Amino acid sequence: MVSFILGTSLLLSSLLPHGSHAFAPSSTHRVGGSSGPIISPSSPSKISTTTTRHNMFTGIIEEMGEVISLETRDDMTLWDGSKGKGTEMVLKGDIVLDGAYLGCSISVNGVCLTATEIDEDAKTFKVGLAPETLRKTNLGTYVPESQQLVNMERASEIGGRNSGHFVQGHVDNVGTIMDQWIDENSLFFKIAFPYEFMRYVVPKGFIAIDGTSLTVCDVHSEGEDGENWFTFMLVEYTQKKIILPSKKVGDTVNVEVDVLGKYSEQAWEAFVPKMEALETKVKQLEARLQELEGGDSTASSTDKVNYGEPIGLSDVAAAATAPAPEQVKSDTEKWVRAEQTFINADDMRKDRKNTDGTEW
């Protein structure tokens, strides 16, 4: 039953839209000063506006892109026409713009972002960074002057292959690189991570680091006041395809734990109270049965079961344990299960009649 709940929840989650529109897309600003066509809500797009992609990712990075600009403005147009403050980032990519359209989702360093403007010729696109995005991720540190590259991936296609795992693009928090070392042709990283999320990090489990689907190697958790970290490694091929090898000790990474762990926890929290209530009722029935058989109940006087308090299927249980009038014994007689008489199979023949001669 739990597996069914988890599977259904995960399937539904993968089909629902999760785009994070921080503000309305601009319709007048040209990206990067290019003289080529710009795609905006008010202009016809040469890029397809129909797609089978949904806002889930696989963690298989398609390319490393460049941050062109990061700007905070106070004249952003909100849904009601009023002006508000917001942050915009312009990025340059190639593969991720293949099939892109206004409102599509692109993963940037593991963050699901919405394309609000696309310049086909300049190969650039603009996204909005909501305050929550800036609080939970390291994207605010990616200023053009740093010349840092970012991992990019398009949203996955329904029914397509998934060589990584289900990555939502919803970063849980940032981790800090504590150490890194080489193991033959593998590159290991040790990441410090907040204790509140460590219960979702398990050895050989999935984890997304800057949007890259990776396998956890070791996990160490000492509690809220102790050291909490995990390790993972990059094979030779992956080292050349993502930005992680360029980072050093002290740098931060965006971390998204495996969403399946969260669904499992939520399903279990709903399931446990029902199991506890069922176990309590079973103990009550066992105690009652032992009393009927003449044995001593294991319940102490302080833990004496109150059979008048219904728990779950109390009415059914009461009917099952209550003796019928003709079965009532005297105070000196004991009920012994092994000595009870059951229906004789011969009495179940098809030609059996009722006492008045009618069909049975």
Image: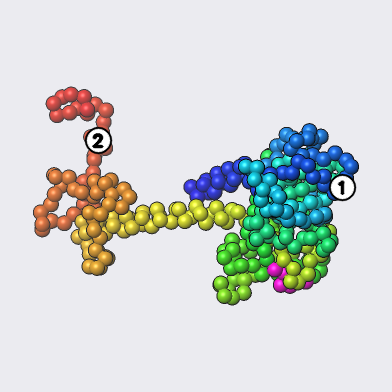
Residue 195 in picture, x, y percent from top left? 58, 68
For mark 2, give the secondary structure.
Answer: helix
Q: Mark 1 highlights which residue?
A: 33
Query: Disc 1 on helix, strand or loop?
Result: helix
Q: Main secondary structure of the magenta part?
A: strand
- Pick whichever of labels 2 and 1 is earlier in the sequence: 1
Instruction: Tell me: residue 344, above or below residue 311.
Output: above
Q: How does the figure colour the protein chain or chains?
A: rainbow
Q: Nearer the viewer, residue 53 or 284?
A: 53
111 left or right, relative to 243 = left
Which image quadrant for residue 99?
top right
Q: Which residue is mark 2?
A: 346
252 in relation to 343, above or below: below
The structure residue drawn at horizontal position 20% and vertical position 60%, both measured from the top left corner, is 294
Left or right of residue 183: residue 345:
left
- In this rendering, the answer to whether 360 lies above or below 19 is above
Q: Nearer the viewer, residue 14 or 234?
A: 14
The residue depicted at 73 percent of the width and 56 percent of the height is 72
Three-letter residue code for mark 2 = Asp
Q: Is residue 25 above or below residue 148?
A: above
Q: Which residues are magenta?
A: 176-181
User: Which amino acid is tagged 1?
Assistant: Gly
Question: Which residue is at 84% across, 41% downward?
Answer: 120
Residue 259: where, in percent of width, then height? Answer: 60, 54
- As drawn, is 264 to the left or to the right of 39? left
Quadrant containing the C terminus in the rendered view: top left
Q: Residue furthest right?
A: 35
Count residues near mark 1 (Cα–Cα under 10 Å), then give few for <14, some for 14-19, many for 20+.
Answer: few
For the residues carrying marks 2 and 1, which lies nearer the camera in this image? 1
Residue 193 visible? The answer is yes
The spot of residue 338 in percent (x, y) is: 24, 53
